[in-house]
Amino acid sequence: QSSLRFNVLYMGSSSLPPDWAEAVWLARKKGARILWNQNGVGYPAWAPEHWSLVNEPMKELLHEADYVLYQSRFCKLSADEYLGERKRGWEILYNAVDTKAFHPNPPRDTRDSLIVLHAGSVEALYRFRAVALTLAELLRRGLDVKMIVAGRLRWSPDPATSLQEAGDIINELGIRQRMILLPPYSRSEAPSVFRKAHMLLHTKVYDPCPKVVLEAMASGLPVVYSRDGGLPELVGEDAG
């Protein structure tokens, strides 16, 4: 019964449990406060057939909660547009980074190849294709560059299919000798992944508040990114 001795229920829009309605009911019955973390929302261009269904539980919890944390100003604007503007009890709070683990390291030897990193799970094929095309273009321009892709390739339900499609793109562009695919990494391994690179390339469009970008900047890496979503307010002119 110790698990029921709580006075705050914290939930996030990007990891909503299937029994969220029961949890909210129990919290209200106990008199516990509900804290809601609002990340991205569904919108027509992202999921034309079911974007509104994705938003239904978020809309309910956004207005039911006692207090709301928006992960960026972009998250607040998109929630206002698709979930309805919340009038009470909210603030913008960006994702946190452990700066004891993620911190700048001594500069790399400038005689090394330029190492560009794309990190984190790749959930859409366009993101990997953009990485591969970027590498091909840099090589066409005569740069001594290598691209590291670290994390899960999971735009297909079958990981083997995603890996095969990635390999086909790499072969098509003739970049196999310059593309390094690393396996998925743990949280404790993440700092060492960032230490391998000179900069981060982040290809997801309209990303609300990507933690991987904050970790890269905490590690001293400049970020090349799509100027939309929450990234401009995270990266700004100095780090991009």
Image (tube, grey):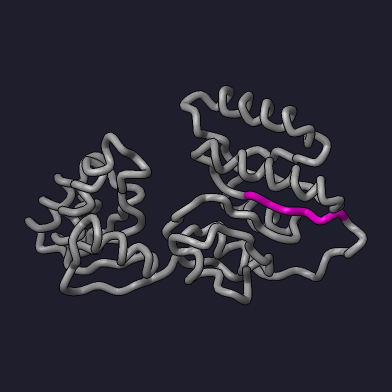
Answer with the quarter of the image where residue 218 lies: bottom right
Indicate the position of residue 99 as horizontal and vertical percent values: 59, 70
- Say if residue 181 shows up in the picture: yes
Reply above or below: 181 against 220: above
Q: Residue at x 14, y 56 (%)?
A: 27
Answer with the quarter of the image where residue 111 lies: bottom right
Region of the chain picked out in magenta, as a range: 113-118
Of helix, strand and loop, which mostly describes the magenta segment? strand
Q: Residue at x 24, y 48 (%)?
A: 55
Answer with the quarter of the image where residue 237 lies: bottom right
Task: Examine the structure image and report whether residue 116 is included in the region drawn in magenta.
Answer: yes
Q: Residue at x 72, y 28 (%)?
A: 172
Q: Residue at x 23, y 52 (%)?
A: 58
Indicate the position of residue 197 as horizontal and vertical percent values: 74, 56
- Say if residue 101 shows up in the picture: no
Question: Where's the C terminus, which quadrant?
Answer: bottom right
What is the residue that sits farthest to the right in this orientation? 111
Task: Examine the structure image and report whether residue 138 is included in the region drawn in magenta.
Answer: no
Reply above or below: 172 against 231: above
Depth order, front residue of 141/182 = 141
Reply above or below: 175 against 189: above
Indicate the position of residue 47 as horizontal and vertical percent values: 34, 39
What is the residue that sits farthest to the front in this orientation? 141
In the visual, does 41 lie left or right of 114? left
What is the residue that sits farthest to the left in this orientation? 29
In the visual, does 213 lie left or right of 11? right
